[in-house]
Image: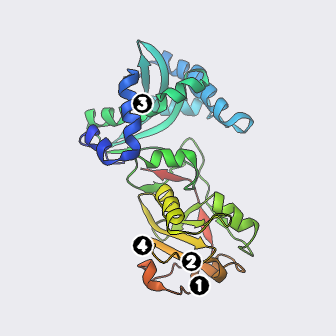
Amino acid sequence: MNVPEDLQEFGRSHRNAQTDLRRIRTRNFECHLSREAKDFALFCEKFHRPHTTARHGSMRMVSPRWMLRYVFRQGMIQWVTRKGEKLAGGILTIKGKVLTKRVNGVLDGRADLLKEGVLSALYVHSMQEARRLGCTEINMGGSMPSLHDGVFRYKSKWATGLRSHDGFISANCVTLLAWNRLAGPVAEFLSQTSLIHHDQDGYSALWVFPHDEPLTVKTLQQHYDKLDTAGLRRFDILLPGDVPEEFVCPANVRLIPMTAVREGGPEQLKLCELAAPALTHETILPDVNSTSQSHAQPS
């Protein structure tokens, strides 16, 4: 995201961020930066490891301590405190005019502190620190490449674009996705887990409208408003029926009938012909033989 000139003005123009800004003001959270070695040990043992464990359980992959120390020596720890007590922290680095958030942690992984908004406080205070340190951009870290991913949705309320994750600390894999027949389990998966995929020099998204919901102007608009994200080159939406007559299709959206692609693989997305091209505001079809997926990183 671009570092905002005025945080309160940013909140007024970004409705989804207003709640976080208001909550942080009322909770009396404060922030400071530290490069002290003792703080690094405290962060690893009492914040990062418990938070990662609480969040991911048996599937957790805690970054090696030597790697975190290497990053810490290049940067610093940002602490969120209240009445002097450390409640959350994160390692960040600065290169040029870009502040990059690396890893976060919450005291003992406590769910009550998450509900109070300590991680939101980390993000908001990082904007203030970035401006104070002369940075113009914040690299917000990575997420799973899906419009439905909770971390991605949260970071998207602040982000102004997407870029590939640098793979630093957490490995970044690029996966080639393919299917023989879209209808059935694949369509069901894509209706619940929309995919962000590589598209030329940017990113596009693919989502299937749920077959068990009524396809109306209202439901289509509600889903679009929830999933649309800044920085997408194109948003392909596969529909189980006809396009609702009064739906105003945004310029970056392609509405594709499932009947045109249900029996084929990803190549059908390239070959399909839309019944009403004018609805899409775009007539150039992507050069996609398969869909590649990677960690998407709001920036």
* Residue type, mark 4 in image: Val
- Identify the disc placed on residue 121: 3
From the viewer's perspective, is the residue at label 2 or at label 1 nearer?
Answer: 2
- CB contact under 8 Å: marks 2 and 1: yes
Which residue corresponds to mark 4? Answer: 248
- Frontmost residue, 113 versus 293: 113
* Residue type, mark 2 in image: Ile
- Frontmost residue, 277 versus 269: 277
Going by the image, does 190 lie left or right of 2? Answer: right
Going by the image, does 122 lie left or right of 190? Answer: left
Q: Quadrant of residue 288?
A: bottom right
Q: Which SS class for mark 1?
A: loop
- Identify the disc placed on residue 256: 2
- Frontmost residue, 88 versus 165: 88
Going by the image, does 130 lie left or right of 285? Answer: left
From the viewer's perspective, is the residue at label 3 or at label 2 nearer?
Answer: 2
- Identify the disc placed on residue 272: 1
**Residue 32 visible to an observer of this rendering:** no
Q: Earlier in the sequence, mark 2 or mark 1?
A: 2
Q: Earlier in the sequence, mark 3 or mark 1?
A: 3
From the viewer's perspective, is the residue at label 4 or at label 1 nearer?
Answer: 4
Above or below 165: residue 179: below
* Residue type, mark 3 in image: Ala
Q: Which SS class for mark 4?
A: loop
**Residue 48 visible to an observer of this rendering:** yes
Which x, y percent locates residue 211? 67, 67
* Residue type, mark 1 in image: Cys
- CB contact under 8 Å: marks 3 and 1: no
Q: Earlier in the sequence, mark 3 or mark 2?
A: 3
